[in-house]
Amino acid sequence: MAMAMTNTALAFFLLVAAASFLSLPPPSLAVTSPYVRPKPRATLSLLKDDDDGRKPEQVHISAVGSDKMRVTWITGGDAPATLEYGTTSGQYPFSATGSTNTYSYVLYHSGNIHDVVIGPLQPSTTYFYRCSNDTSRELSFRTPPASLPFKFVSTLRHIGGDDYDMLLLPGDLSYADLYQPRWDTYGRLVEPLASARPWMELLRGARVDAVFAGHVHAYERFARVYGGKEDPCGAVHVTIGDGGNREGLAGSYVDPQPAASAFREASFGHGRLEVVNATHALWTWHRNDDDEAVVADQAWITSLASNPACNK
Ligand SMILES: *[C@@H]1O[C@H](CO)[C@@H](O)[C@H](O)[C@H]1NC(C)=O
Ligand SMILES: *[C@@H]1O[C@H](CO)[C@@H](O)[C@H](O)[C@H]1NC(C)=O
């Protein structure tokens, strides 16, 4: 238990370092995908199926520093902000108690929002936990590995598999559009994923030398760009805001397609960034084609550190 996952900090640093020096292979032909998206289905609304107001819901976790995890959940009524956890299913030798908050927005009053930070935790380890002493439901998450490879995914559907370490949210989570209960629907919808792997929010794109930007509801991958022009020492730009909103996709692109645009498609999907080692990362974008995840774009991203022209 005491063995902290200090190397995770290193892995994370390497990821950022790798992301900082990404360089794509020589630009290929600009591709506009011919895929035409079917019309969206009806807006989802998940109503509460609770009971006595003590059932934890909308459970999600996020990484805090290199070896701690923040667990957040909501109960309709009063319940302790206690998290019980351990590395064996059904046994919870550890517990921690955090804080509880609420907020109101016009006529909306949130449930009790509980927040607990636990750790230090071991790397690549499954922890079993339960919230608010609720004996009816055990949840589990796996901590990220202490060293590479390190796998990230972004956005929701088709990522229920186990083969990733962290979820990266480039922004535009759900839109409430003044109707706050929609946030609760979102929280319930994502819980199976959000309670199992840490979520890292990159609202509007955290800017390193590789830019993963949200907000625009479409997908587009660019070559390395600096000052609006292709530059082998610039930053790789990926627009991955395809989580969507009820207003639909952003279907219009700059026409004709700029040479720096390697691939673009107005569609929904999710991306995976696998940092294989200190010099190589594999970026894959999966279109959510009806109910199938289909690989629609993929590129190896290699370290600029190995390009002497960019290290003067
Ligand atoms: C909740 O669980 C903790 C840890 O197991 C325990 O110390 C505490 O007394 C429990 N609280 C309630 C209200 O049952
Ligand atoms: C990093 O991974 C890539 C892709 O698998 C491989 O070609 C390369 O040799 C690896 N580099 C090192 C230093 O292991």
Image (spheres, rainbow, N blue to C red):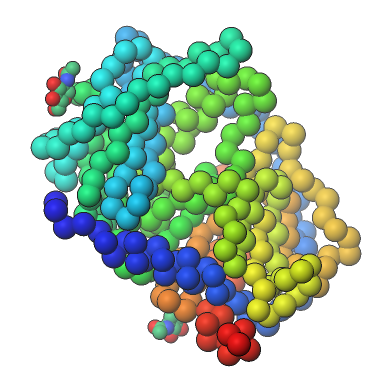
Q: On screen, 76 above or below 272? A: above
Q: On screen, 185 above or below 277? A: above
How many marks do you count on the picture? 0
- Which residue is nearer to you in this view: 289 or 32? 32
* Residue sitting at x 62%, y 77%: 24
Rendered-image quadrant of the C terminus: bottom right
- Which residue is nearer to you in this view: 255 or 306? 306
- Which residue is farthest right? 256
- Which residue is nearer to you in this view: 7 or 24? 7
Q: Position of residue 160 (x, y in %)?
A: 42, 46
Q: Is residue 196 visible?
A: yes
Drawn side of residue 269 relative to residue 127, left or right: right
Q: On screen, 38 above or below 180? A: below
Q: Position of residue 162 (x, y in %)?
A: 36, 53
Q: Quadrant of residue 137?
A: top left
Q: Position of residue 70 (x, y in %)?
A: 34, 40
Q: Position of residue 149 (x, y in %)?
A: 37, 69
Drawn side of residue 197 relative to residue 281, left or right: left
- Which residue is farthest front? 312
* Residue sitting at x 68%, y 36%: 245
Q: Is residue 287 visible?
A: no
Q: Quadrant of residue 254?
A: bottom right
Q: On screen, 140 above or below 113? A: below
Q: Quarter containing ligand 2?
A: bottom left
Drawn side of residue 259 relative to residue 67, left or right: right
* Residue sitting at x 83%, y 50%: 252
Drawn side of residue 130 relative to residue 180, left or right: left
